[in-house]
Amino acid sequence: MDTSEFGLEDFLKDLLAFGYLDGEDVAQGITRQVIDRGVESLSEKQKWVFNNRVIEEYVIEDCKLCSAEIPWEEKIGALDNGGYCSWCQHKLEKDD
Ligand SMILES: [Zn+2]
């Protein structure tokens, strides 16, 4: 895996760092395993939990306003701002 680009693993590290998975012991353990050994290391059951409790819950694919794809490095920010890309967030802040 190319580690020079911000990707899923970096996003997962942020997810843990910002405490999104606090109290979710199972999801947290699986997420740590993905960071260490990759999604391929998960069992079928773990993959299901990872997809349903982590990916579905926390990964925002597209911006709520302009529908642009949100890159991995902005997904944690989108989670925090309600689902906007950095461009729209900037625009919304300026309008305030
Ligand atoms: Zn946008």
Image (cartoon, rainbow, N blue to C red):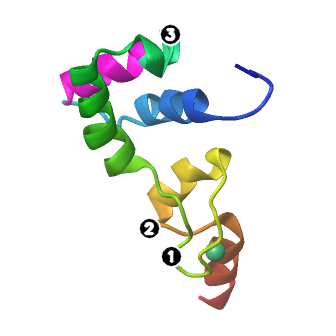
Q: Nearer the viewer, mark 3 or mark 2?
A: 3
Closer to us: 70 or 43: 43
44 in relation to 74, above or below = above
Q: Secondary structure at mark 2?
A: loop
User: Distance between the Cα atoms at labels 3 and 2?
Assistant: 29 Å
The answer to whether 1 appears left or right of 53 in the picture is right
**Lower sequence index among marks 1 and 3:** 3
**Image point (62%, 80%), residue name:** 66
Question: Which image quarter has ligand 1?
Answer: bottom right
Closer to us: 56 or 95: 56
Name the amino acid type tagged 1. Lys
Ligand 1 closer than 8 Å to the CB at disc 1? yes
Residue to which mark 3 is pinned: 36
**Image point (34%, 49%), residue name:** 56
Q: Secondary structure at mark 1?
A: loop
- Which mark, by number, is residue 82? 2
Magenta region, main secondary structure: helix
59 in relation to 21, above or below = below
Packing grade of label 3 (10 A; few <14, some 14-19, many >=20) is: few
**Image point (47%, 57%), residue name:** 60
Span shown in magenta:
24-33
Q: Position of residue 7 (x, y in %)?
A: 64, 35
Residue to which mark 1 is pinned: 64
